[in-house]
Image (cartoon, rainbow, N blue to C red):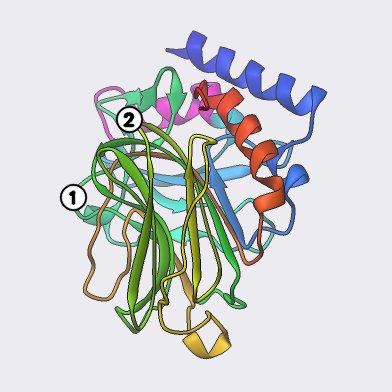
Amino acid sequence: MHVSLDLALGRELRLNSVGESVLQIAPSAAAAYSLRSLTGGDPKVVRVRRSSDNVESDFTVSGISSGALVDFVGSGNDGFVDTWYDQSGNSNDAVQATDGNQPKIVNSGALVVDSGIAGLDFASNEFLVASSVSGLEGPFSLFSTSVRDTTGYTGSFSKSSAANRYFGIQEATSASLAAARNSTSVSVAASVSGTDRLSFALTTGETSTSVGALGGTIANTTNDYGNDFTSGSGLDQLAIGVLRTVSPTGYFNGRIRELIFYTSDQSANRSAVETNTANYYNITLV
């Protein structure tokens, strides 16, 4: 286990030494969540609660790859993520205070991995939320990297006090979808196969919602979702593993590896970000 993780860390260090990190390629994110470094350093990435006694501890990227996280959780125990730290510098950390709603990162003493690379395992009613986030006005861009088990939403911009204000990504059986609502529901889908997902969603206004999967062609709809997302829309949170927190729906089942939220149009950076991400996670782009 540790051999494969050390190899993954080595791959990350090589990427950061010969090229730019994701947040150097596409700076000024509203929030950025991953278990790898998105900055080129060794940032604190998660706070983990162990099942044996509910003690919690923070871990950096190297603390995960070295085996320190697994050692902390202990043989046969589970580790749950209380906080997924924001690497953007905005301190929009995604938190889940309720033990029963926390995603898993260690299962029975083993790090949760797909192809040797760690991710957060979401199931049933597990989700994280960055609350009281300011400045959530469109345009919105969202990069999402995951391994899908069943249909659900990996991430969304949403409103903490309303069920009809959101913009997010859903991973379905054979499509990645962008879903937008600012009074009226709109969605658009890009065809995709397999369980490894790397998706990009964008809205530049109420009549422009777009999505692309695995680096493929962008699908766009001009259907009107009500109004542009302005300060008056009241969006104030970033949800991970669920579409919204009011009348919660769309729970994701699978591993979420990385989510990067922007309050800007990142179309120009899409190719570079997705190439960097695909190289790290061994994802084949179309």
Tell me where the magenta segment starts and ends, as one range: 64-78
Residue at far front of view: 222
**Could you classify mark 1 by the number of other residues whose Cα lies within 10 Å: few (under 14), some (14-19), or many (20 or more)?**
some
Dividing the picture into quadrants, the one containing residue 251 is bottom left
Q: Which residue is mark 1?
A: 124
Tell me residue 182's x, y (percent). 40, 80
Taking 59 as reference, is 222 above or below it?
below
Residue at far left of view: 124
Decide which of 144, 194 is in the foreground and name it. Answer: 194
Identity of the amino acid at label 2? Answer: Thr
Picture mark count: 2
**Could you classify mark 2 by the number of other residues whose Cα lies within 10 Å: few (under 14), some (14-19), or many (20 or more)?**
some
Q: Which residue is mark 2?
A: 195
Identity of the amino acid at label 1? Answer: Ser
Residue occupying the point 57% across, 15% down: 6
Q: Give the label, 1 or 2, closer to the camera.
A: 2
Decide which of 267, 254 is in the foreground and name it. Answer: 267
Residue occupying the point 30% across, 70% down: 245
